[in-house]
Image (cartoon, rainbow, N blue to C red):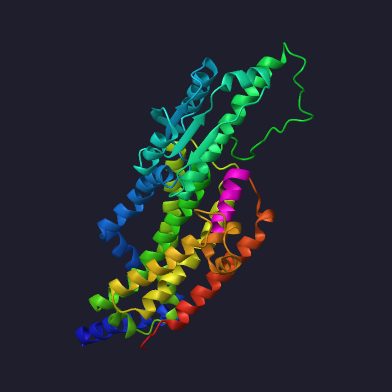
Amino acid sequence: MNKRNKNIKDIAKPNQLLSRFNPRGFGALKFLLEKEFKQILRNKFLIRVIIFLPLIALSLLPMVANFEIKNNNLAVIDNDHSPSSSLFIRKIVSSGHFHLVSVRQNYNDALNDIEQDRADVILEIPAFFEKDLMTTYSAQVNVTTNAVNAVKGALGSGYLMQIIHNFSNDLRSRFMAGNSKIQTPAFEIVPRYDFNPYLEYKFSMIPAIIMMILGMISGFLPALNIVGEKEKGTIEQMNVTPVGRFPVILSKLIPYWIIGFIVLTICFIVVWIIYDMVSVGGYLEIYLFATVFVLAFSGLGLIISNYTNTIQQAMYLMFFFVINFIFLSGLYTPISSTPEWVQTMSLFSPLRYMIEALRSIYLKGSHFGDLWTKFAALVGFAVFFNLWAILSYRKKA
C-alpha cells in the first residue's frame, strides 16, 4: 500500500511542475534558452566564426576596400631637361601616388606605354618650361590619362593636378620674396577636413565594415537555426509541444542578440589594437543602436528561416538581402551620388541607418538627440521584422 502511494506521489510531481510551467507563456522561455545556448556551445565552428570573423575582416577589409589610388604608373616626356623640370618630376614621384615607369623622347612612345597597359598617366613637360617660369611666372604641361578604369583615371589626374598646383605655389612663394612684380592673390583657400583631417579612407570604412560584420552574424545565424532544425527533424518535437509561438521566436532571438554584443565588442577591441581608433562619442549610444539593429536583422533571418526548407535556400535568400542592403547603405559610395530611385530604395535598408549612426558617433561624437530619427527607423524595422517572424512561424499545436 505504501509502495503504491509512493508511485502515485511520484506521478503527481511532474503534473505539479507542468501546472507551474505555463507552457504557452514565458515559463517555457528559460528551458528554450537553455536548449539554444547548449546547441551554440556544442557548435565549435560557430564559436570560431564569432571570434575570428571580426579579427580577420577588420585586419584585411579596411586595407582592401580603399578608394585611395597609389602607385599610378607615370610616363614622362621631358622636353626641357632643366633643373626645374627635374625637381618637378621628383616632387611628383615623392608624393607616393605615382611610380615612374618610363621617360620617353616623344609623345607616341609614351602613348604606346598606355596602350600596352604599362602606364596610367602621361606627363609632357614642354621645352622652355624653366624659362617660362622665370620670365612669365607660368608654364603649361600636358597631362594624358588612361580612362579605361574611370575611377583610377579620374583620381590619378586629380592627384597630379594637386601636385602641380602645390609645385606652382612653392615656386611662387620662393620668387615672391625678391621680386615685387609678382602680385599676391587677393585671398588663399586653405581647406580644413573635419573629423578626418588626413583623409584616411579606412577611418570612414571601419565603422561601416563593423556594421556589415554585425549584420551578417545576426542575420545568417538565426536564418540557419530553424532551417537546420527542419532538416534534422528536431523542429517537429518543438511543434508538438504546447509552447506558444512567441516564446519560441524569442528564444531564437535572445542568444543571437547576445552574440551580436560579443561580436561588436571584439570589433571595437580589434580596431583599437590595430588602428588605434576609438569612438569620439563613446560606446553607450553605439550599443543602444546595436541592440535594435541586431534585433531587426535577427528578425529578418527568422522570417527567411520560416519560409525556407533547406539551409541552401536560406543562405541564398539571406545573401540576396544582405548584398542589396550593403549596396544601398552607402558603405562604398555616398547615397547622394546615386540616382533618385536608388536613394528612395535605400530608405528600406536598415544597414544604411546603422552605418550613418555609427560613423556619426565614432568620428564626429554625435549624440542621441542628433540621431533619433535613425534610431526610430531601426525600431520600426525591428518591430516589423520580428512581428512578421512570429506570425509566419507555423506552429502545430
Regarding residue 267, the answer to whether it shows in the image is yes
- Left or right position of 31 against 3: right
Q: Position of residue 237 (x, y in %)?
A: 28, 81
Q: Is residue 54 above or below residue 13?
A: above
Looking at the rendering, in which quadrant would you find the N terminus? bottom left
Q: Position of residue 212 (x, y in %)?
A: 45, 56
Compare residues 15 and 146 and report the one nearer the observer. Answer: 146
Majority SS type along the magenta span: helix
Residue at the spot x=49%, y=39% of the render? 144
Location of residue 195 by image quarter: top right
- Left or right position of 222 against 67: left
Q: Position of residue 5 (x, y in %)?
A: 25, 86
Q: Is residue 39 above or below residue 368?
A: below
Looking at the rendering, in which quadrant would you find the C terminus? bottom left
Compare residues 3 and 293 and report the one nearer the observer. Answer: 293
| Residue 356 magenta | yes
Which residues are the magenta region? 354-364
